[in-house]
Amino acid sequence: MNQADAWERSYWSWEVLFAVAYAATAVLVLVNDGSAAAKIVAEAALGAIAIGYLSVGRRVVHGEDNETARVVAAVALIALSATAILASTTASFVLFVACPLVFMLLELRPGIVATTLLILLEPVSAVLNGGWDNQLLSVLLPMTAILIVFSVLAGKFTSDVLRQSRARAELIRELESSQAEVARLSREAGTAAERERLAREIHDTLAQGFTSIITLTQAIESELDTNLSAVRKHLALAGRTARENLAEARAMVAALAPSDLATGSLPEAVQRQADRLAEEIGVPVECEVDDALPPLSTAVEVVLLRAVQEALSNVRKHSGATLVRVRMSAVDGAIRLRVEDNGCGFTPDADGAGFGLRGMRSRAEQVGGTLAVRTGANGGTELELEVPA
């Protein structure tokens, strides 16, 4: 956007004034008494002003930011106007064109000086062309004073309008630049958020599934020569885990809800997670989910299920527990999930050190929930998540 855009809607009125004032001045000079040579000089100067404005000046006034070009155009305009006025006093009507143009080209103070000098040329021209006895002087002198005052006021108005237009144009340019920067940062933030979401999804699903498969594979290796029934059981569980991992990967690619939720309810999905852990590590896993859970949004269900998966994964990898309890209930307009074990306990200094805990806490905050992980009253670890229902 250039400075002309701010006053484009009213710029046509200036061009109408220019055309009318120029035509009237040229006609008056032509019909006025005076020598042919003076008329030729005045008309030539007026013609040069019109041609210069249409060919170069209009572009400079309308949008040229080159200060040198503005000064050169102003000097040429002043010289041609002075030539026309000094050649024929009647050509002073060109001031209706020249004065506004001077203020469009120059800053306020030099514009005031230039237009004042041009206006003073009118009585000077009357003296040169008619002597001190010229009857026009009695009218021109007071008119000159009035014109100077009017020119200063009109020039200040014009300069203020142009200055405000330039300021608005600059502000718009800065705003557009800021909007582009905001859009870029928004895209980068969205990309980072999506990466974090995918990292959590992979950690909470695929990574845990692969960990389970590795654990089962190690168990198969140790039992291969001694307990074929256990090997078959572990192979079946490994195959089921691999299929579930594949389903999770497909759901992730399709940006769907977790596959456990897509094929059943939240209580069923939590129960399956508990049963899987019991099968994998061979310890009792007590799972209790209230039958009176209110309807939950998909986002809240995902947070609860992922928290169960992460908590049970930590039990599998770190706790050495012989008993695990999973409890989900509705409490005072919220859903509370508690996962307890009687394992080696939880070190407070490690809170937030692992990606899994950070991911759980981040998920909880996204739905307005809270997460607490602590050592239980009788040892072991206790995880408590509370989210709005």
Image (spheres, rainbow, N blue to C red):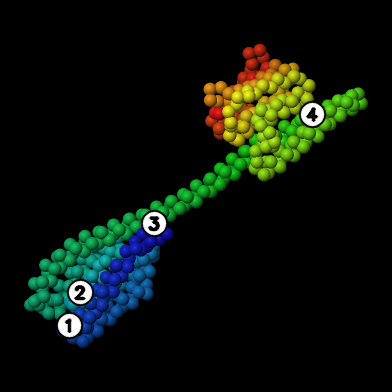
- Between discs 3 and 4, the one toward the N terminus: 3
Q: Quadrant of the N terminus?
A: bottom left
Disc 2 residue type (three-letter): Ser
From the viewer's perspective, is residue 151 above or below residue 20?
above
Q: Residue 71's quadrant in the figure?
A: bottom left
How many labels were placed on the picture? 4
**Residue 185 at x, y percent in the picture:** 53, 46
Residue under the image location 72 percent in, 32 percent down: 208
Please tell me whether residue 348 is drawn above or below residue 134 in the rendered image: above
Q: Earlier in the sequence, mark 4 or mark 1?
A: 1
Kindly identify the residue that appears in the image at 60 percent across and 26 percent down. 293
Q: Residue at x 8, y 72 (%)?
A: 138
Q: Earlier in the sequence, mark 2 or mark 3?
A: 2
Numbered label attached to residue 215: 4
Residue on which the image places disc 3: 169
Which of the marked residues, 1 or 2, is nearer the chain's N terminus?
Answer: 1
Mark 2 vs mark 3: give the one in front.
Answer: 3
Task: Select label 2 or label 4 by which is in front.
Answer: 4
Give me the disc on residue 32.
1
Q: Amino acid at mark 1?
A: Asn
Q: Which mark is first along the chain, 1 or 3?
A: 1
Answer above or below: position of 375 versus 228: above
